[in-house]
Amino acid sequence: MSPSEIAQKVKTHLCPYGFEAHEFKIGWYNEQVGDNFKLPYEDDTMAILIISTPDMFDKSLLPYILRTECPSTGDMLDHCVAEHFNNIKKEFCDCDIEAMHDFELLPSRRPKILVQTAGHVSGAAYYYQRKDVQPDPWDEKTKIFGVSIHPKYGGWFALRGVLIFKNIKYPGLLRRSPVDIVRTYERKKELLERFNFHWQDWTFRDIIPVEQKYSDDQKQYFETLPKDRLALIQEMKCRRKCTDLE
Ligand code: B12
């Protein structure tokens, strides 16, 4: 199978579950990040960034929680995404795949993969950083974290991880630039301020008009403490059944 066929097959597998897959070359990632974050693979090695769209909650997470014995440790969403990554590994058992999740840390406590940078170099979502807002309007002591914005979903998505196909080289892959959809200085400044100083109110996610966003159920799920989430899901299931019967 050619690299493009592999990438297409990964997309076909994951799309029905509310995920998107965006291929990139390790070299594109390594040329952006500092030495501490570089990945030890050749430049032409194929990697695929996986993001979850607003559909993932209904198409993947809810069914997963309802059919699995609840894992006693860890987050159910992380387990659900890990199951999808493992399925891909099984499907492509001839390929040597390393899966890196957004939440994984190196022994040095640094993240294994910077998913926002991967999102930018794969063309999936523009990564807005402090250096994109010039002249810099903030006090130099203030830490300003960057945020990625998807052209269709704004901030209503998450970057879940990267699959590295260690033995697949894809020299011919064409680079797609991410869409710079938050165009003006004022909007970029506004975006970084919402993300850094008001992220709990969710408004950074609406910095552009979006095609789809998280449902009220999904928002409620993420706002609920992990220990109370199972009860919430049971209640949602019950409520949905009742609505179906009406
Ligand atoms: C640690 C972490 C935190 C920490 C610290 C935040 C931070 N950004 O450092 C804390 C706990 C505070 C945090 C909080 C939140 N987080 Co957080 N967090 C992370 C995590 C795990 C790692 C980020 C990190 O440490 N980066 C290290 C620094 C050094 O990276 P960097 O600043 O990008 O620097 C690199 C780039 O600049 C690059 N670079 C240099 N030049 C150039 C040029 C270009 C063009 C490019 C592309 C790159 C590039 O090189 C640098 C490294 O050398 C990521 C997931 C992940 N694995 O990436 C999620 C992540 C950033 N968090 C996320 C979110 C949503 C949040 C919260 C809103 C809470 C939540 N989960 O709902 C809050 C809000 C943040 C806030 N206002 O405080 C999302 C952001 C989604 C998005 N749309 O961008 C992520 C991506 C998780 C995800 N799965 O989607 N988070």
Image: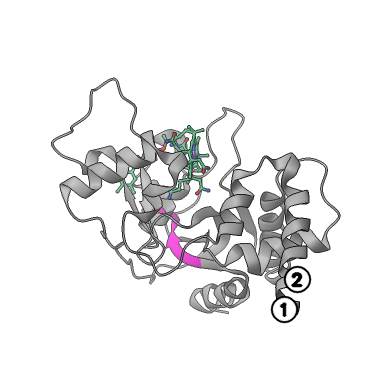
Magenta region includes residue 26: yes
Q: Is residue 100 visible?
A: no
Instruction: Confirm or deny contact between disc 2 and disc 1 (CB under 8 A).
Output: yes
Q: Please say if 228 is above or below 54.
A: above
Q: At which x and y percent is residue 112?
A: 55, 41
Q: Which mark is residue 246?
A: 1
Q: Residues within 10 Å of mark 1 (few under 14, many from 20)?
A: few
Q: Amino acid at mark 2?
A: Cys
Q: Which span of residues is magenta-colored? A: 21-27
Looking at the picture, tell me which residue is in the foreground, 8 or 42. Answer: 8
- In which quadrant of the rendered view does residue 91 lie? bottom right
Q: Badge 2 is on which residue?
A: 242
Q: At which x and y percent is residue 111?
A: 53, 37
Q: Residue at x 33, y 63 (%)?
A: 209
Looking at the picture, tell me which residue is in the foreground, 219 or 103. Answer: 219
Q: At which x and y percent is residue 147?
A: 37, 46
Looking at the picture, tell me which residue is in the foreground, 73 or 205. Answer: 205
SS for dot 1:
loop
Q: Amino acid at mark 1?
A: Glu
